[in-house]
Image (spheres, rainbow, N blue to C red):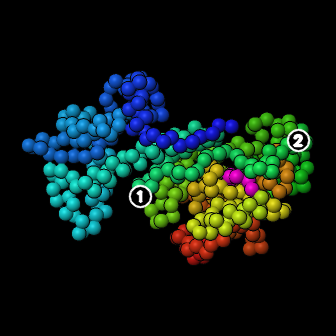
């Protein structure tokens, strides 16, 4: 197992050391191509002297101490200039009337607060891009992940680690191994794994969910004779859609939206995290009370022994927000591990979802009107603090 520790040196310091030692480091933006060349990373400031425009530029792979003022004709980076003015105008548009004086001399030079904002925004953009690249290196599914923040200066979460499957805490075994598998020639019509488990086949011919919430899904496992194209292998193949983690504009923190159209009753993602005992979940829950935010999800399909905590370890579902009228529904899934105490948690669409629409599920796990009845209520995620709901749904309950 690899261990990661934070470096005590800043990126700028490391970049300068690499330059001095002629070392190439792609993570720091230093390549063989730009080792001895100057490439503008972002524009920091603007001024006019003797009728001539100058821009303060940060050079890629060089520390800020090497920033220089360059005349406009020296800059061949039209995209960066456009981004500079986009950030400037955004800052101006958000200024209160009494603050307009900060820009009264903007023709000649920018106020320090303005240039500071532009630099912070540029650094945030770089940090989010690096995080986006890290997420796509770590994810195991086909869909791409994107990150977007056009709302504030919040950067990547500092204490979150992306995983694709459950992370078992000490004393918990999440792997499991199926003892038997099916021998179907056609799992859709044959005597497949769901039949052997005494439940209904979960999917239709289009691999869309057709059972009611509260009923389990038994997919084909590693011992089954069927191949990867089996219609009973859906959740195990991973999320097929490209998704975007974005900053919400109404104070709900990060959210997730789909970049592709999703059909009704389609598998979208799994809820994964660290699997802990219920006793440990109770202890952590008391710690989370102080923030009013928790990612604890009880695995109590038949018992209440284990809980998933996605606070530090999780996938894109960590960022999915609550809604009282959600477009995702939770189902319990069993594949190779048939331990009923440890189901996998899959999220399926409750209705057609448009590209660009935010993905949500109900933290109280009550099914939507077309998939469940009033008598069905899945086990809730632990929500110990009464928090005001900001989902904006017409049927919003007011509190989580």
Residue where numbered disc 2 is placed: 181
Dot 2 crowding, Cα within 10 Å, few <14, some 14–19, many 20+? some
Quadrant (top left, top right, bottom left, bottom right) of the N terminus: top right
Q: Can residue 381 be seen in this view?
A: no
> In x, y percent, where is residue 236?
73, 44
Q: Residue at x 53, y 57 (%)?
A: 255
Q: Residue at x 40, y 33 (%)?
A: 15
Q: Residue at x 81, y 48 (%)?
A: 173
In magenta stretch: residue 152: no
Instruction: Tell me the quarter of the picture where residue 93 sits.
Output: bottom left
Instruction: Tell me the quarter of the picture where residue 288 sits.
Output: bottom right
Q: Is the magenta stretch mostly helix, strand or loop?
A: strand
Q: Which of 287 and 228 is in front in this view?
A: 287
Q: In this view, does 185 lie above or below 158?
A: above
> In x, y percent, where is residue 64?
32, 40
| Comes first in the chain, label 1 or label 2 | 1
Q: Can residue 243 be seen in this view?
A: yes
Of badges 1 and 2, the one in the foreground is 1
Residue where numbered disc 1 is placed: 151
Quadrant (top left, top right, bottom left, bottom right) of the C terminus: bottom right
Q: Is residue 200 above or below residue 68?
A: below
Q: Where does the magenta region start and end? A: 271-276
Dot 1 crowding, Cα within 10 Å, few <14, some 14–19, many 20+? few
Instruction: Identify the disc placed on residue 109.
Output: none
């Amino acid at each position: 197992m690899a261990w990661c520790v934070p470096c005590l040196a800043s990126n700028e310091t490391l970049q300068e050391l690499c330059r001095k030692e002629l070392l190439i480091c792609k993570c720091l933006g230093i390549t063989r191509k730009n080792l001895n060349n100057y490439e503008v990373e972002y524009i920091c400031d603007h001024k006019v002297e003797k009728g001539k425009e100058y821009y303060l530029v940060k050079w890629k792979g060089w520390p800020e101490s090497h920033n220089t003022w360059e005349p406009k004709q020296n800059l061949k980076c039209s995209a960066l200039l456009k981004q500079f003015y986009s950030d400037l105008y955004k800052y101006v548009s958000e200024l209160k009337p009494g603050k307009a004086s900060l820009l009264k001399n903007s023709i000649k030079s920018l106020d320090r607060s303005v240039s500071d904002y532009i630099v912070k925004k540029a650094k945030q953009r770089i940090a989010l891009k690096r995080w986006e690249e890290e997420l796509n290196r770590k994810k195991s599914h086909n869909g791409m992940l994107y990150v977007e923040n056009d709302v504030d200066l919040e950067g990547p979460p500092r204490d979150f680690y992306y995983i694709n499957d459950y992370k078992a805490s000490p004393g918990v075994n999440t792997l499991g191994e199926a003892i038997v598998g099916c021998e179907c020639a056609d799992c859709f019509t044959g005597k497949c794994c769901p039949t052997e488990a005494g439940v209904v086949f979960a999917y239709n011919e289009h691999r869309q969910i057709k059972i009611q919430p509260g009923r389990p899904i038994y997919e084909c496992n590693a011992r089954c004779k069927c191949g990867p194209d089996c219609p009973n292998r859906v959740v195990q193949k991973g999320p097929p859609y490209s998704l975007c983690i974005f900053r919400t504009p109404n104070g709900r923190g990060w959210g997730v939206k789909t970049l592709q159209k999703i059909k009704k009753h389609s598998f979208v993602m799994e809820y994964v995290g660290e699997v802990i005992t219920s006793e440990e979940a109770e202890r952590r829950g008391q710690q989370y009370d102080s923030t009013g935010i928790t990612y604890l999800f009880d695995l109590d399909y038949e018992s209440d022994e284990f809980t998933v905590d996605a606070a530090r370890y999780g996938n894109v579902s960590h960022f999915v927000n609550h809604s009282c009228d959600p477009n995702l529904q939770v189902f319990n899934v069993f594949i190779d591990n048939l331990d009923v105490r440890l189901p996998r948690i899959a999220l399926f669409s409750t209705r057609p979802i448009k590209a660009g629409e935010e993905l949500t599920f109900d933290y109280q796990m009550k099914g939507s009107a077309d998939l469940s009845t009033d008598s069905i209520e899945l086990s809730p995620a632990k929500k110990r603090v009464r928090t005001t709901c900001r989902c904006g749904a017409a049927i919003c309950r007011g509190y989580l």
